Image (tube, helix red, strand yellow):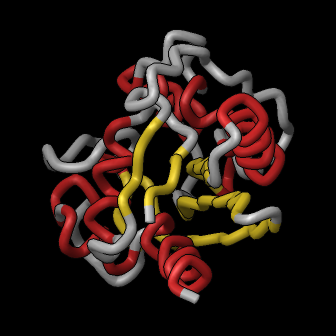
Amino acid sequence: MTLLFATHNDHKVEELNQLLPDSISLISLNDIGCEVEIEETGVSLEENAKIKADFARMKFGLDCFADDSGLEIEALDGAPGVYSARYGGEERDMDKNIQKVWNELKGHQNTRAWFRTVFYLRLEGKEYVFKGRVEGSIIFEKRGTKGFGYDPIFIPKGYQKTFAELGDDIKNKIGHRAIATQSLIKVLGS
């Protein structure tokens, strides 16, 4: 089965391809020549995932799914959340995003955070929503070279290393997208 993942983010496609069985092949918006940047105008991860999946289904007529993921920090009332990719500015510069998180957390003892993802699947005329969440905390230094986004400053609960230090093997077992992907696989496999 070939399924369109409505994203331009090659890191996410690579991560999910590692999680999916060989019987499921992902293609991205890049693979089909879609250069349109889908506007994420929703106020929640759920809304943004639906907007992207609906756009891809209407434009290309293919079974597809989209995700929206974000880092949510307890002391910042859930921020950056839906604005995670652009937290430090519209240019999506992760160094600026991380720096803003650190600036906002100054003076807070509580660094509890979690990554959350929402998948919205449109398959054979039906719609499905899958969610994943991983708890952890923020640190005030970057550690590790694997992963992307906020991975170098996020330590998952029960570990001493950041996602960027732990690498794909661990992240693909405990990560927020890994959790949502298991639910996705169950529906695709049925």
Q: Nearer the viewer, residue 161 or 66?
A: 66
Q: Could you tell me if residue 178 is visible in this image?
A: yes
Q: Nearer the viewer, residue 167 or 55?
A: 55
Left or right of 66, for residue 33? left
Q: Is residue 8 left or right of residue 124?
A: left
> Relative to residue 4, is residue 178 depicted above or below?
below
The picture places residue 157, in percent across and down from the top left corner, at 41, 77
Residue at the image position 67 percent from the left and 71 percent from the top: 130
Specify the quadrant of the image occupied by residue 93.
top left
| Percent x, y of residue 18 | 26, 65
- Note whether 119 is above or below 158 in the view shown: above
Q: Nearer the viewer, residue 142 or 178?
A: 178
Q: Quadrant of the N terminus?
A: bottom left
Quarter of the figure with residue 107: top right
Query: Which residue occupies 72% across, 51% down?
Result: 78
Residue at 78% x, 53% y: name it.
46
Number of numbered callouts drawn: 0
Which residue corresponds to the image point at 70% horizontal and 64% vertical from the top-left?
123
Give how far across and how far down residue 135 sits, in percent: 52, 72
Residue 113 visible to an observer of this rendering: no
Q: Position of residue 77 (x, y in %)?
A: 76, 50
Q: Which quarter shows the C terminus?
A: bottom right
Relative placement, left or right, of 48 versus 146 is: right
- Name the side, left or right, on which 144 lies relative to 174: left
